[in-house]
Amino acid sequence: MRTRFPFFISVEGSEGAGKTSNVNFVKETLQARGCKVCVTREPGGTAIGELLREILLEKHEKPINDQTELLIMFAARVQHVEQVIKPALAKGECVLCDRFTDATYAYQGGGRGIDHDRISALEKWTLGDFKPDLTLLLDIPVAVGMQRIRKRGELDRFEVEDLSFFERVRSAYLDLANKHNERIHTIDASQTLEQVQLQIKAVLDRHLDLSTAKHPEPSW
Ligand code: Z5A
């Protein structure tokens, strides 16, 4: 069955997968079909969340403990869900979020090695069953993704991790996609941007019922 309007969509992927480039594409595709779109990101999306994002991405003299990192991710997320995501959906807007809870299972679970059940307990406690309606997982071999991000300049606290960290992140994402295949759709992000966007458009057409979306206001 296709998801009915308004939609909560998340975009996930490991380094260099092209999330930023493709979030814009999804936004324009939904807007062209008459949806008002709230674009947001994690960690971040609120004033407090953006402060927490700075703490998470900056390199510190003394390292952040893995459990602390996990708790900050969820602290930022609760703020984001309550102040931005749920209010936007309640107003009939579609929410397009650059990363959400799947990223925690991939990075803190796969990457850092925190137990899945511990993350799941935190998710239940803070969000209940609140999840995206649809998730686009941009999948790319680690080496190809790393080549892309090296062209971008200074690396943040996650981007300096070694290849084995990102292999674990990728593998955790693919496991999630396997487990939740009705919600998470894997896109081959190693192709050209044009080919990636064709795959994304096909998923949106197949899974979202846009017939109930509001139509754009006339400009006169
Ligand atoms: N994190 C976490 O650990 N746990 C959590 O729960 C959450 C997050 C929510 C910040 O995330 C960090 O937070 C992240 C995980 C952690 N780790 N890191 N780093 P972020 O999403 O803000 O940061 P990011 O991963 O760097 O995302 P990004 O800026 O959207 O990067 P991207 O996916 O690589 O996308 P891009 O900038 O669009 O593309 C990268 C380059 O590739 C760029 O030059 C593009 O022009 C190029 N590109 C894109 N697509 C193509 C194609 N198809 N062909 C060729 N070149 C391409």
Image: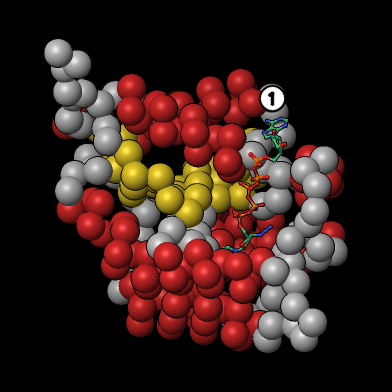
Task: Give the SS element for disc 1.
Answer: loop
Whether 35 is drawn above or below 130: the answer is above
Q: Position of residue 63 (x, y in %)?
A: 75, 83
Q: What is the quadrant of residue 70 in the picture?
A: bottom right
State left or right for residue 219 relative to residue 176.
left
> With 85 as the anchor, is 120 left or right in this view?
right
Q: Position of residue 19 (x, y in %)?
A: 58, 42
Q: Is residue 81 left or right of residue 210?
A: right
Residue 142 sits above or below residue 123 on the image: above
Question: Viewed as shown, does residue 119 lie left or right of 58?
Answer: left
Point out the residue furthest to the top here.
Answer: 220
Q: Residues within 10 Å of mark 1 (few under 14, many from 20)?
A: few
Residue drawn at the location 23% of the way across and 51% of the way down: 89
Residue 2 visible in the picture: no
At x 61%, y 21%, the residue is 194
The residue wearing badge 1 is: 192
Q: Within 8 Å of ligand 1, the CB of disc 1?
A: yes
- The x and y percentages for residue 23 are 50, 38
Q: Provide residue 215's location: percent of width, then percent of height.
A: 18, 24
| Residue at the image position 30 percent from the left and 64 percent from the top | 83
Looking at the rendered image, the quarter that the C terminus falls into is top left
Q: Is residue 62 visible?
A: yes
The three-letter code of the residue at mark 1 reads: Thr
